[in-house]
Amino acid sequence: FASTWAAIERDYPQNAPRNLGNMGYLGKTSLYLPSYIQQAAYNEQGWILEFYRGFNVSWTSAARYFDPPSSVDKSLLKPCQETRLMISQAMKHYVEVTADWDGVETVTAEGTTSIRGRCWDGYFWYPPACRDDASKCVIFFTGGWNLEESMQKAAGWNMPLSPVVAIDWDRFTKLPLQYDSTFYWWISC
């Protein structure tokens, strides 16, 4: 997001945030999944799902251990139109990194052309690995964070991760407990 940051500093120098240093809080963010799913996949198939290659659809069918996107109550989710999938610069970067033009759509309105993430059902973005059959996608719940990164990883590493944004913080913290899924989270170090 260096270009976005540079534009903010150039266009709004009096309001641009300044980096005042570290607050002393160190942490890590990642894709998380329940240990019972990790254990079942390992015990039954020898698949190591805590490693990204364990999701590669070329040699595993990890989705069998997760609920399909169609099982999620959509009233608990943000529609794609309210997520970062609609930010043209973010989706342009996604295409630059992955060359996955099928995962986005080009929209022209009022003489302006933009790129936005393609949403097949209004809520979920489907990666190339499961785009033809959404029942083989693995839900990735987020509150909006890590959306583009998860899309890039899914496309680049042939993972069936299907990111979706919870409607609010309360739902974000509860959805991973209600569905066998992956989810965005962080830990302190």
Image (tube, rainbow, N blue to C red):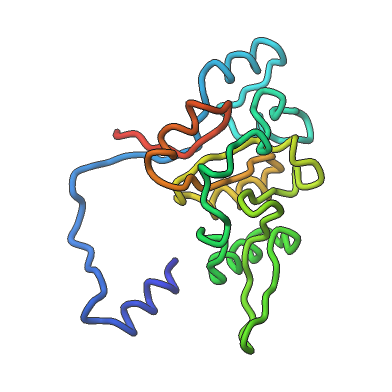
The foreground one among 99 and 147 is: 147
Q: Position of residue 162 (x, y in %)?
A: 63, 43
Point out the residue furthest to the top here. Answer: 43
**Picture quarter containing residue 68?**
top right
- Count of numbered circles on the image: 0
Q: Quadrant of the N terminus?
A: bottom left
Point out the residue furthest to the bottom here. Answer: 111
The residue drawn where x is 72% and y is 15% is 45
Q: Quadrant of the C terminus?
A: top left
Point out the residue furthest to the right here. Answer: 132
The residue drawn where x is 66% and y is 38% is 69
Q: Position of residue 158 (x, y in %)?
A: 71, 43
The residue drawn where x is 58% and y is 19% is 37
Up/down of 163 relative to 115, above or below: above
Up/down of 178 relative to 145, above or below: above
The residue drawn where x is 79% and y is 35% is 58
Residue 5 in the figure: left or right of residue 105: left
Residue 88 in the figure: left or right of residue 46: left
Up/down of 83 relative to 33, above or below: below
Q: Position of residue 157 (x, y in %)?
A: 67, 43
Up/down of 79 relative to 34, above or below: below
The foreground one among 106 and 188 is: 106
Point out the residue furthest to the front here. Answer: 75
Q: Position of residue 180 (x, y in %)?
A: 58, 26
